[in-house]
Amino acid sequence: MPARIIDGKAVAARVRAEVAEQVSELHERTGRAPGLATVLVGDDPGSAIYVANKRKASEEVGMRDYHHHLPADAAQEDVEAVIAACNADPDVSGILLQLPVPDGLDGPSLTAQIAPEKDVDGLTPISGGRLLQGSPGLRPATPLGVLELLDSEGVALEGAEAVVVGRSNLVGKPVSLLLLERNATVTLCHSRTRNLPAVCVRGDVLVVAVGSPGLIGAEHVKPGAVVIDVGINRTPDGLRGDVEFEGAAQRASAITPVPGGVGPMTIAMLLRNTLAAAELQAAALTARR
Ligand code: NDP
């Protein structure tokens, strides 16, 4: 029987509606709506679209929008100054530095300057360390979206075999740690993994974040597995995931499509992180009074 298709758009819409409700409640309670600062350097059209989408989504849920656009030839110190101002601004709950930054700028060093309590992308070394240690902190948005989709399907993660393909700091590694936190038995694969199909086919849950269209086929999928395809690849045939959908869907019990699977979740989880950051900042302010 072909797999159930996991509707990321519907799950993301539900998360966004929940966030909107909680933003309004926070606003009423504290007199301050959460604020999201976006920092865009340069004129890459793809990055500009991503940032515009995030700004629009944050306004739709009632958040305040603080946008900073710097020219492509901005100096490292210019971007650092914007980040420092956002760190210090009590109206800014979350900061998003759009990556990649133009050549000549040190992206990791800039990211590291975002205050951990405003790191709504969850990408600073401090947030990464907290995730590694299992202590509270902001987690990266796309990996949170993967977990939200698994939860929306009611997938029992405890004790399950979870195989993750791709070990980037952005997706693969944090997804693995979140799955581990939920007591899955996690195998993390990468470009040097030997006999990838034999490893993948062990997964009750298979999460793929590689950036190689159609890399994962039916032979990688355990019958009945839940397959989450994080890949977004622009091909002459349009957007494609890392999973060869038709074949994999014949063996999986549930699978995400591309587009319409993980993609919509990233912004939804970014909004949820911004709300969580604003709640923590409001609580800290109350505690100081
Ligand atoms: P990276 O390029 O940073 O990482 C890719 C990973 O895939 C690396 O760990 C690499 O291994 C591994 N890999 C490459 N080739 C193979 C192979 N043949 N077999 C097994 N593993 C392989 O990519 P990202 O993690 O940033 O992104 C992955 C995909 O997810 C992309 O398509 C990206 O567009 C998409 N994405 C989607 C998002 C969303 O919102 N849905 C958000 C972020 C990313 P090694 O480390 O050994 O080189």
Image (cartoon, rainbow, N blue to C red):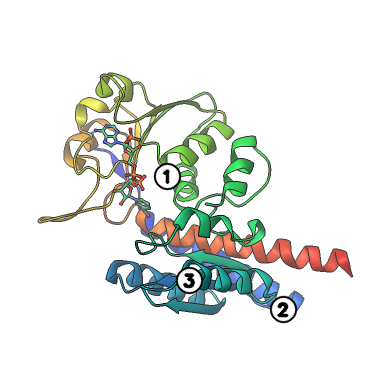
Residue at x 67%, y 66% (from the top left corner): 278
Q: Quadrant of residue 45?
A: bottom left
Residue bearing the label numbered 2: 28
Residue at x 55%, y 73% (from the top left corner): 82
Residue bearing the label numbered 1: 171
Residue type pointed to by label 2? Glu
Alpha carbon distance from label 1 to label 3: 21 Å
Indicate the position of residue 137 as horizontal and vertical percent values. 65, 49
Dot 1 crowding, Cα within 10 Å, few <14, some 14–19, many 20+: many
Quadrant of ligand 1 in image? top left
Q: Earlier in the sequence, mark 2 or mark 3?
A: 2
Residue at x 73%, y 81% (from the top left corner): 31
Residue type pointed to by label 1? Val
Residue bearing the label numbered 3: 39
Position above or below: 219 against 135: above
Instruction: Describe residue 166's horizontal placement relative to residue 276 as left or right.
Output: left
Asked whether the residues under the numbered discs 1 and 3 touch, taking CB atoms below 8 Å apart as contact, a structural biologist would say no
